[in-house]
Image (tube, helix red, strand yellow):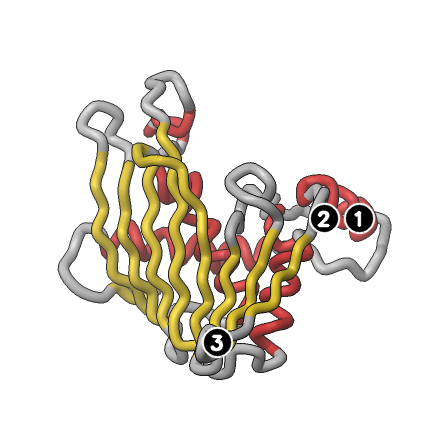
Amino acid sequence: VLVCEAFMVIYHPQWIKVRDLIASGAIGRLRHVQGAFSYYNVDPKNMRNRLDLGGGALPDIGVYPTVSTRFSTGKEPQRVQATIERDKTFGTDIYSSIRADFGDFELSFYLSTQMAARQVMVFHGEKGFIEVFSPFNAGLYDHHRVELHNQNHTEAQVFRFPGTQQYRLEVETFARAAQGGKERVFTLEESVLNQKVIDAIFRAGGKDGWEAV
C-alpha cells in the first residue's frame, strides 16, 4: 500500500527548478534561507483555530517553509530557536518566528494566522540569490515565478510556470507511483523528519535558546 502526505509543493516545477539551481551552483554556497507565510483568519469554527482539531499556524503552514527548504537543499536542520504567540481565546499558536540551523546554512521564517496574507521564500548564496514569489499557493498570492539574481544584482533570470496545477501534478504522480511507476513521491519517512522539526519548534518556543531537532 502506498501512503503519502500530500505536500503538493514538491511536485510543482518551480520548486524542482529551485532545487536544480541550487545543486548546479547557480548561487554559489548557500548561506541563508528566508521565508514568510501568513494569512488572516479569526473564525472560531474554522479548524485552523480549533486546538482540538490540530489547529494553529505551525501545524497548518509551518510545515511548508521547512519542507520546501529540505526538498530544495537535501539537508536536515540540526537545531532550532523559536518565539511563539498563542491566541488567548483559541489557544492555538497564531504567530511564530523561527530560526533553524542546517549546519551549512540557516533558515529563518515567520508564520501567522492573524496577519495580512503574504508568502515568499528567498535562497541567498555567495554568488546570487533565488526568490520564489508565490512559493506555496502559486497563482493565488502571486504568479508562478522564480527569479535568479547574480551577485551584483546586475542580471536576473525569470522562470515562469503559467497554468501549472500543482495539486493535479501531485495526484497524477501518486497514481503512477501506485501503479508501479518509479515516481518521486513524498514518503512517510520524509513526513516523520518534517514533523520532528515542527515538534522541536514547539519545544523551542517554551525555552530560551537552541533546541535539538
Residue 178 lies, in percent from the top left, at 80, 48
- Judging by the rendered image, the residue that carries numbered circle 3 is 128
Q: Nearer the viewer, mark 3 or mark 1?
A: 3
Secondary structure under the numbered disc 2 in the rendered image = loop
In the picture provided, is 141 more to the left or to the right than 24? Answer: left
**Which numbered disc covers residue 2?**
2
Within 10 Å of the Cα at label 2, are there few (<14), some (14-19), or many (20+) other Cα atoms? few
Residue 78 lies, in percent from the top left, at 36, 71
- Whether tag 2 and tag 1 are in contact, CB under 8 A, the answer is yes
Q: Nearer the viewer, residue 37 or 3?
A: 37
Find the distance from the CA under tag 3 to the CA under tag 2: 39 Å
- Residue 162 in sight: yes
Between discs 3 and 1, the one toward the N terminus: 3
Between discs 2 and 1, the one toward the N terminus: 2
* Residue at the (62%, 80%) spot, across then down: 24
Q: Amino acid at mark 3?
A: Gly
